[in-house]
Image (cartoon, grey):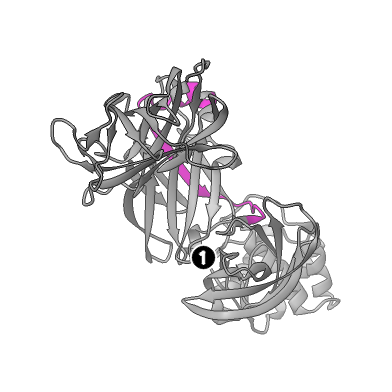
Amino acid sequence: MTFALSSSVVFGHGLGGEVLPPVTIQDRDATLSIDVSPSIYDPENPEHSVTIRLFDSNTEAIIEHVSLVLEMKKDGEQIFKHTFHDEMGNLNFQVISDDSDEITIKGIQEPILRGWMKAEDQPLILTGPIFTSGGLYEYKVEILTIDSDDNILEQKVELEGAISLADIKNFEVSDSQNKVHDIQVISYFDIISDFNFDSNKVSFSMPFDWNQNLEQLSVIHEEIRVPNTFGEFLSTKYNAYVNGILMPDEVVNIDDYSFDDRTVHMTVYREIIKDIREEAIKTSDSKIDFKLETSESVQFPLEFATPDLRFKVYLSWEPETIRAGEETTFFVEFEELFKAKTKRGTEYDLKIIQNDKKIYEKYLIGNINSDIPNSHKIIFEPEHVGTANISFSDIDGNPLSKGNFIIVINPPLIAQVQEIPAWIKNNAGWWADNTIDDDSFIQGIQYLINRDIIIVSVTNLQESKSQDIPSWIKNNAGWWADNTIDDDSFIQGIQYLIENGIIVLN
């Protein structure tokens, strides 16, 4: 028996796989999922597995005796369109991609709609030019039957979406100390080119037709993987640009789940592409230029979801720049997912790992779902300067409730102060009462630095900025000249000038 059904179309987009929104089929809400594994294009491995499941949205029970038409496209060109069938509603077929002229199918056909299906002891195999490059593959699924082979729907249900096979490229870049790092760019849309790294910026391009019908586009997703040893490019915030246009903050997402590298996601959705099209075309109508740069501003909190999807973990710290020898207060919050947000106690392990060695470890008791974050104070030693992983594990006693953030421990800015010449103190007094100008005073401080009377680290210093010296520093200089405050208090003001680029080191 069949039921009349209004034709409906559901759209989606996935990265190697996706679960589409529910759609009503006869007397139930049904959900379709599609998955391609592996989700990476590798010319050395031409085999992929495609799985399509139709299941009840409420009970998650598989819907059996499903016949469907699957059409696959790449760059608007049809790759294939065939009817498939599976008695158990869990369609699985193998894809072997090659450079032959046509696609061949190895399997059997059911007798009613001639849908391709696996033989009793043999998999269903499609061989031919199918997954021949990385990027976005669009698909359309038409549901023909459910529940029994002859229950043919009078009005078909159509579902559309796109899955991506990642195209991966590796590049070597050098930091300010000429140390070489490997940066990996993973494109889920098309093949990238024109990669460049300059100081704190990564840029690359990709073919893109800005004049296309953007309603057929869901999302453009790019990933930049940065090794956790590349401290200069590990920032709490990144700015992303498309064709020179600054993107909203939500386009960029930082993922520190891996201990070995950071993944920075750039996810540009259709509505953003539509909004910027007119301006972007002025740069090029046939390509899209990406740029990712570290931001001078700090964005807290960092966050991750635990692999078991029990918790979301948020992290921030004060002061914003972590320095060896100075106390850093870390703030961590645990929020339960998919449960009532009731404040309660918890326990967890905090570890800081550097170069595969634990440099800090502590068992802690704190709160979940609290408005007040858990806090913990740590002072890093000078030998800890560099990048490190701060991990939280066994949250609430669950071994899979864990995760990781990457932090950068900076050296002390001022490591040593020798005896300061008397004429510098005279200069400070004259500067405080405006007898000499700012430049003359700064020249005296630069003399101290260049003669190693004040020894400083050049790591992570700001570039020179055109700005006034704060009045409190001039007040400090006058009090220091009068011996009202000691050398260390005066040096704090000098440290501020160096950190903010007012004093530039030679």
Residue 100 drawn at (x, y percent): 13, 35
- Percent coordinates x, y for residue 278 in the rendering: 49, 21
Q: Which residues are magenta?
A: 275-302
Name the residue nearer the viewer: 269 or 233: 269
The type of residue carrying mark 1 is: Asn
Q: Is residue 314 above or below residue 85?
A: below
Q: Is residue 426 depicted above or below 93 in this figure?
A: below
Relative to 356, 73 lies left or right: left
User: Can you tell which quarter of the image residue 496 is in?
Assistant: bottom right
In reply to whether residue 411 is colored magenta, the answer given is no
Q: Give yes or no for residue 299 being in the magenta stretch.
A: yes
Residue 26, given in percent of the width and then of the height, sits at 53, 24
Residue 297 or 45: which is nearer the viewer?
A: 45
Mark 1 secondary-structure assignment: loop
Report which residue position mark 1 lands on: 506
Q: Residue at x 60, y 75 (%)?
A: 351
**Residue plotted at (47% across, 20% down):** 1
| Residue 382: quarter of image | bottom right
Q: Which residue of the protein is positioned furthest toward the bottom in this rendering?
A: 419
- Left or right: 350, with 174 as reference point: right
- Percent across and percent down for residue 425 are 74, 75
Report the residue that reaches farthest toward the left.
Answer: 100
Asked if residue 409 can be seen in this view, the reply is no
